[in-house]
Every structure is written in structure tokens, then in C-alpha cells.
Image: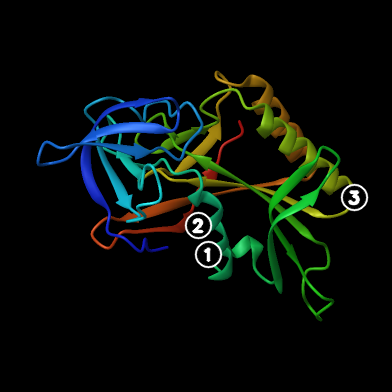
Amino acid sequence: MIFPQAMQSAILLQRYQRFLADVRLADGQIKTLHCPNTGSMLNCQAPGSKVWFTDSGNSKRKYPCTWQLVENSAGQLVGVNTGLANQLTVAAIQNEVVTELAGYAKLATEVAYGEQGSRIDILLSNSGQAGAPAAECFVEVKNVSLAVGPQRAIFPDAVTLRGQKHLQELMLMRKQGHRAVLLFCVQISGIQAVAPADTIDPVYGKMLREAVAQGVEVLAYRAEFDIPNSGITLSTGIAVDLV
């Protein structure tokens, strides 16, 4: 995807109240950005980090500028806007980048399903075309922003009861005969593998492995960043390490 506005750079001063971040521009001006990430942002919010943001130009917004990327201490670019994960995944499916999810005629988003009042991020389905996958495919997308080395990332970056619930719902869909897929959208440059963060949320790690044992598929794709052209693309399949 290409942002309609050019990405601008700044230096992070602080993130606070979860949704706000103060940055210093090159001319010394201090600007407050909207932070589109409710998570812990572990290793992604160190003061002094270089960040990139977009300016909506919408004067009706209290904070018209949105934080998009940060350079972590290892020099990796990290996408902090969790709201982009679904958009990036939808585009990758439609462009047949995610080959494991090819062949479906219909794609819907935010569809109610399951037994816990959930909404699936992406629902893929067909209308009985010859040679097409028969079962509906429920795809839950998780944004990954925590690197633990130059080529390895982990999820989650904090205990996630919501993530545990989504795994339960995916297992239910699998028991009902549908395809159930968890897709990690890894917004970190250079990453080659993603794994469950067992030291952060051991319950999630255990449940993820249980889900796989019951037939839930787990995929991971890495984003590529094109700062000069203000673009982010989900383009490269990477390994999922459950050992």
C-alpha cells in the first residue's frame, strides 16, 4: 500500500497515554502524533529513536499526524501502526502474494463468527466454482513488531487475552470443518522467522501449539518498507518456529 501523504521523519521524545507520542522535527518544532498501537510497543518506543509519520492534513482531527514507523535499537524498521496489518494482508491475498490463500472468489472483512462475540479479520469463500476450495477459510491477522535479533521476531509483546480468545474461535471453526488460519503480519525489516513469545505469554504459546495440533494453519509474511515512496508491502513468506 502507498500512503496518500509522504512519510516525514522526526526524533521520538516520548510515547504516553498509549495513543500519543511527542516528536521533534528537523527544525526543532515539537509535534504530537497519534499513536495507532494499543500494545506495549516493547523495544519500539525508546526516546531518541528515529520515527516516520504521515500528516492527514485534516484540521478536524485533534492530532492529524499518525506515527507509522520507528527504527529500533538494532537499526531495523518497524511498523507500529497495527491498523495496517489487515489492509496489508488483504492486499497481499488479492495480489496472490499469499499463495496458501489463493483460489477463493470472495473476500470479506470483520465478519461476525464463533461463540464469543468475535469478528474474523478476513473470511474467504467460494460459490461452488469447479476446482475451487470448498470450505470457508477464516483468517485471523496478528501484527508482529517485537524483534529479538536480526532475523527473529516473537508474538505477542504483552499478555493477550484477546489473542487467546481468537485461537479458541479458530479451533472451533476447524472443528466445524472450515479452514482456520492465523497469519502473522511481521512489520519488521530483515526478519526470517517468527515464534510465540513464551516468556511473555506462555498461555498463548501453549494454546497456539494446541491450535496447530487441531489443524489450525499458521502463516507468516514480512513487510517491506519503501520510505522514499511512502509505501509498505506484505511480500515475503517467512518461517514459523513452534519448537
Comparing 20 with 217, the one in front is 20
Q: Secondary structure at mark 1?
A: helix
Q: Are marks 2 and 3 in contact (CB under 8 Å)?
A: no
Say whether residue 222 is left or right of residue 129. left
Answer whether residue 90 is visible to the viewer in this image: yes
Q: Gap between marks 1 and 3, in whole Å?
A: 28 Å
> Taking 70 as reference, is 140 above or below it?
below
Q: Nearer the viewer, mark 1 or mark 3?
A: 1
Callout 1 touching callout 2 (CB < 8 Å): yes
Position in image of residue 31 (x %, y %): 25, 37
- Gap in Å between the C-alphas at discs 1 and 2? 5 Å
User: Is residue 75 positioned above or below 236 on the image?
Assistant: above
Above or below residue 180? Residue 163 is above
Where residue 122 sits, quadrant-wise, is bottom right
Which residue was labeled with disc 3? Answer: 176
First in residue order: circle 2 vs circle 3: 2
Q: With 171 as the anchor, is 101 left or right in this view? A: left
Quadrant of the drawing holding the N terminus: bottom left
Binning the other alpha carbons within 10 Å of mark 1 as few (below 14), some (14 to 19) or many (20 upward) gives: some
Q: Which mark is residue 91?
A: 1
Dot 2 corresponds to which residue?
Answer: 88
Residue 187 image point, x, y percent: 43, 45
Q: Residues within 10 Å of mark 3 (few under 14, many from 20)?
A: few
SS at mark 2? helix
The residue positioned 84% from the left and 76% from the top of the image is 128
Query: Residue at the location (83% across, 48% down)?
Result: 173
Whether residue 238 sits left or right of residue 64 in the image: it is right
Q: Quadrant of the C terminus?
A: top right
The outermost residue toward the front is 60
Q: How is the image coloured?
A: rainbow
